[in-house]
Amino acid sequence: MKFAVFTASSILTISFAQEKATFTLYGEGDTRGSPNCATNVNVCGQPNQSGITAALSQAQYGLAPGQGTSPDCGTCWKITITSDLSGNPVEEKTAKITVNNFCPMYSNPICNTPNEYDDGIHFDLCTETSAESFLTFGTGIGTERQVSC
């Protein structure tokens, strides 16, 4: 996505760069005791949008539990998986996701970014929004880029 900023003497174009990211799954019945993630009982207070939704790593979300909603709530991202967590190549898949929650660093260590894979951003994808169709191994490494919704 590009934005144009107009000033009296010039035009400045800003684009969101593609960066490295990690991905996991969460949802009702997982080993961390997560609730159903396809409801409006999430930190953003938003009902499930169409398509895959995700919890954003706490560092990017910018707030601790109970501190309210982030400007990142409702943002959309293009994510591409390229390898498993061991670095082995997997079939590349791309999906557009919407952030509607955040992944607290205390409940899932990979959400504490930068994480052990040197990724600065992490997305915990909601299983109740068909995230397994994108992340068939349950975890992965790839790229992310913020896009328009």
Image (tube, grey):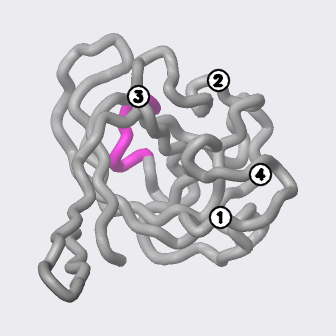
Q: Main secondary structure of the magenta part?
A: loop
- The residue lying at 24 percent from left, 76 percent from top is 3
Q: Earlier in the sequence, mark 3 or mark 2?
A: 2
* Residue carrying label 3: 119
Task: Please name which of the two marks, 4 or 1, marks the residue nearer to the observer.
Answer: 1
* Residue carrying label 1: 70
- Helix, strand or loop at label 1? It is loop
Residue 65 counted in the magenta span = no
Image-quadrant location for residue 68: bottom right
Task: Tell me the distance, in whole angstroms, between the alpha carbons under discs 4 and 1.
Answer: 20 Å
Indicate whether 82 appears above or below 85: below
130 left or right of 141 in image: right
Task: Please name which of the two marks, 4 or 3, marks the residue nearer to the observer.
Answer: 3
Task: Tell me the distance, in whole angstroms, between the alpha carbons under discs 2 and 4.
Answer: 18 Å
* Marker disc for residue 80: none
Q: Which residues are magenta?
A: 132-139
Q: Earlier in the sequence, mark 4 or mark 3?
A: 4
Q: State the count of labels.
A: 4
Q: Earlier in the sequence, mark 4 or mark 1?
A: 4
Counting other residues with Cα less than 10 Å from the Cα at mark 2, is it few (<14), some (14-19), or many (20 or more)?
few
Type of amino acid under label 4: Pro
Type of amino acid under label 1: Ser
Picture coordinates of residue 82 (x, y %)?
Answer: 21, 32
Q: Earlier in the sequence, mark 2 or mark 4?
A: 4
Picture coordinates of residue 130 (x, y %)?
Answer: 45, 57
Task: Please name which of the two marks, 3 or 2, marks the residue nearer to the observer.
Answer: 3
* Residue carrying label 4: 35
